[in-house]
Image (tube, helix red, strand yellow):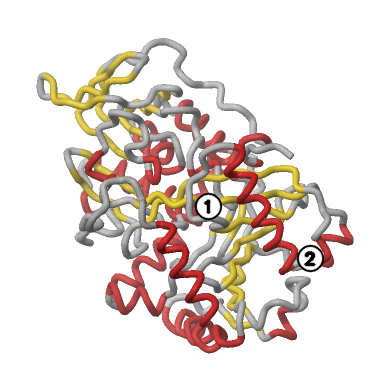
C-alpha cells in the first residue's frame, strides 16, 4: 500500500514551472496552486493580464489533489436548508452556480485538450437509514420542481441496478453531476495557464506581505515579487505556512481532515457486483462516506474517518483501517480486496458550510468550499479573476457576511467534540 494520493501518483507532472528566483512586477499575484488559483491565473493570462502564481509545494498539492474525485452539482447540505438560510433567490443562484462551474470545467477541458477522463456520471445521495428517506425524497422533489427537473427519486428496487449493496433504502439521482481524474485536470489546468502566459512558481510559500511603493510585496524563500492586486486561493491550507500573511482567514476557515482509500483495480465481475451504475455516491449519515470508481476501476472510498488532520503515515494508516471497515459494511464482497493507496487531506469548512468569495484584508479571496470545492472552484477562480479586472458583479456570493468562528484562532481544538456529537446524531437518527 502507498500512503499517497492516487491522483498525485497517476497524473503527469507539471513541467512548466519557473526555475529561477521569484521576482518581477505583476498586475495580479495569486497565492495557491489548486483549482481556484489556477483557474484565476488562466483567466487573467488569457485576458492579457500579467499574473504570477505562488504555490507552497507543487500544483494540486492540497485539496485539489486529495479529494474524492466527485463533481457533484447541488448544495452540500440540501437545497431546502439553503433556501431557509439564504432565501429563495440566492439559493436558486447558488444551485445554478454549481451547474455553471461543472459546465465550465467541461468547456475548459475541451478548450485546453486536457485528458482527465471527465464524464457526466450522475450522483446518488443514498438513504442510509429508513428514517432518512422522507427528508431526502422531499428535498429531491423540491429540487426537481424548482431548479433541476432532471432530478428524480429511486426506490430500492430501482437502486439495485445502480449499486451492489443492500444497505440503502432509496436515493436521489442528479444526472448533471460528473467525475474526472483530479490530478490530470490540475496538471492540465496549470499547463494551460502557463501556456497563456502565467508565471507559476512551485515550492514558493508566501511568508510575508506588505505594501511597498504603492504595490503589494510578497516574500518567499525563493525571492519576492510585487503586484497591484492579490488573490488568495489557499482554502483549507490558509495560514498553514509559518508566518504566512493569511491570518484573516484562519478564524473563518475550519480545516477538517478527510481520508480516502483506493482499492486495486476491480475485475469486470467485481465492478458489476459493486457499482454497475458507475456514478458518484454519497451516503446520508452525518459522518458518512463517498465513493466512486476510478478510470482504471478502483473503488475510491472516502469519509471523515477520524476528526483529525492527516499528519503522518501512522495517522493515515489508522484512518485507512476505519475506511476499510466502512467499505466492507457497505460492500461485503470487497472485504478482502487489497488497498493500493491511502491518503488524507484537509477540507476547508465555514461555520454555515457555504463557501465565500470577496475581498478581505487587502486580498481578493475564494475559499471555504466545505467539501464541494472540486466542482465549484473553477467557476470561483474565474470570478476572482474578473473581480481583479474590475468586475465586482462577478462574485456569485457577493454580500454574504462571513463572521469569525467564536473561540477559534486556527487550531480546531473542538473537532473531537464535534465528532462525538455527530456520532450520537447518527446513532439516534
Q: Please, is residue 238 above or below residue 96 in the view?
A: above
Please tell me how many numbered marks the rendered image carries. 2
Q: Nearer the viewer, residue 118 or 32?
A: 32
Q: Is disc 2 placed on a helix, strand or loop? A: helix
**Numbered badge on residue 365:** none
Q: Residue at x 10, y 19 (%)?
A: 213
Label 1 packing within 10 angstroms: few (<14), some (14-19), many (20+)? many
Mark 2 and mark 1 lie on one chain; the one further toward the N terminus is 1
Query: Can you identify the residue that label 1 sits on?
Result: 258
Q: Please, is residue 90 above or below residue 395 in the view?
A: below
Using residue 320 as the reference point, say whether residue 74 is left or right of it. Answer: left
Q: Of all residues shown, which one is farthest toward the left?
A: 213
Q: Is disc 1 placed on a helix, strand or loop? A: strand
Query: Can you identify the residue that label 2 sits on?
Result: 274
- Residue 194, position as x, y percentages in the image: 46, 26
Question: CA separation, marks 2 and 1?
Answer: 23 Å
Q: Nearer the viewer, residue 417 or 396?
A: 417
Q: Residue at x 39, y 22 (%)?
A: 204
Quarter of the image with the N terminus in it: top right
- Residue 342, position as x, y percentages in the image: 66, 44
Q: Please, is residue 183 above or below residue 429 in the view?
A: above
Q: Please, is residue 286 above or below residue 15 in the view?
A: below
Q: Quadrant of residue 240?
A: top left
- Residue 26, position as x, y percentages in the image: 27, 23
Q: Residue at x 60, y 44 (%)?
A: 316
- Residue 277, position as x, y percentages in the image: 73, 68
Label 2 packing within 10 angstroms: few (<14), some (14-19), many (20+)? many
Q: Nearer the viewer, residue 419 or 226?
A: 419
Q: Of all residues shown, which one is farthest toward the top?
A: 20
Using residue 142 as the reference point, say whether residue 280 is left or right of it. Answer: right
Residues at discs 2 and 1 in contact (Cβ within 8 Å): no
The residue mark sitting in front, 2 or 1, is: 1
Amino acid at each position: 500500500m502507498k500512503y499517497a494520493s492516487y491522483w498525485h501518483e497517476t497524473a503527469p507532472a507539471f513541467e512548466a514551472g519557473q526555475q529561477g528566483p521569484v521576482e518581477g512586477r505583476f498586475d495580479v499575484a495569486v497565492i495557491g496552486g489548486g483549482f481556484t488559483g489556477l483557474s484565476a491565473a488562466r483567466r487573467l493570462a488569457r485576458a492579457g493580464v500579467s499574473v504570477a502564481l505562488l504555490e507552497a509545494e507543487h500544483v494540486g498539492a492540497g485539496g485539489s489533489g486529495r479529494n474524492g474525485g466527485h463533481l457533484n452539482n447541488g448544495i452540500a447540505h440540501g437545497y431546502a436548508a439553503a433556501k431557509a438560510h439564504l432565501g429563495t433567490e440566492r439559493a436558486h443562484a447558488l444551485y445554478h452556480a454549481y451547474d455553471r462551474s461543472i459546465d465550465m470545467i467541461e468547456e475548459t477541458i475541451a478548450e485546453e485538450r486536457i485528458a482527465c477522463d471527465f464524464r457526466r456520471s450522475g450522483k446518488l445521495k443514498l438513504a442510509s437509514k429508513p428514517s432518512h428517506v422522507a427528508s431526502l425524497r422531499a428535498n429531491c422533489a423540491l429540487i426537481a420542481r424548482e431548479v433541476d427537473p432532471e432530478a428524480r427519486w429511486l426506490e430500492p428496487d430501482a437502486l439495485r441496478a445502480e449499486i451492489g449493496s443492500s444497505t440503502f433504502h432509496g436515493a436521489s439521482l442528479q444526472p448533471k453531476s460528473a467525475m474526472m481524474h483530479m490530478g490530470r485536470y490540475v496538471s492540465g489546468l496549470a499547463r494551460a495557464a502557463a501556456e497563456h502566459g502565467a508565471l507559476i512558481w512551485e515550492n514558493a510559500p508566501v511568508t510575508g506581505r506588505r505594501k511597498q511603493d504603492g504595490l503589494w510585496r510578497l516574500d518567499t524563500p525563493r525571492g519576492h515579487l510585487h503586484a497591484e492586486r492579490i488573490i488568495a486561493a489557499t482554502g483549507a491550507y490558509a495560514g498553514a505556512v509559518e508566518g504566512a500573511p493569511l491570518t484573516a482567514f484562519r478564524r473563518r476557515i475550519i480545516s477538517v481532515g478527510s481520508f480516502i482509500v483506493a482499492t486495486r483495480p476491480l475485475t469486470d465481475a467485481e465492478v458489476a457486483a459493486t457499482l454497475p451504475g458507475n456514478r458518484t455516491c454519497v451516503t446520508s449519515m452525518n459522518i458518512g462516506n463517498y465513493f466512486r470508481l476510478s478510470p482504471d476501476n478502483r473503488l475510491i472510498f472516502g469519509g471523515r474517518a477520524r476528526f483529525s488532520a492527516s499528519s503522518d503515515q501512522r495517522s493515515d494508516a489508522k484512518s485507512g483501517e476505519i475506511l476499510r471497515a466502512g467499505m466492507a459494511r457497505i460492500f461485503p464482497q470487497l472485504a478482502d480486496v487489497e488497498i493500493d493507496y491511502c491518503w488524507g487531506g484537509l477540507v476547508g469548512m465555514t461555520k454555515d458550510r457555504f463557501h465565500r468569495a470577496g475581498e478581505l484584508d487587502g486580498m481578493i479571496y475564494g475559499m471555504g468550499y466545505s467539501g464541494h470545492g472540486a466542482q465549484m472552484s473553477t467557476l470561483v477562480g474565474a470570478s476572482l479573476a474578473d473581480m481583479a479586472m474590475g468586475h465586482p458583479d462577478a462574485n456569485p456570493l457577493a454580500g454574504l457576511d462571513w463572521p469569525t468562528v467564536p473561540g477559534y484562532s486556527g487550531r480546531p481544538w473542538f473537532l473531537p467534540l464535534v465528532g462525538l456529537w455527530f456520532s450520537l446524531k447518527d446513532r439516534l437518527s
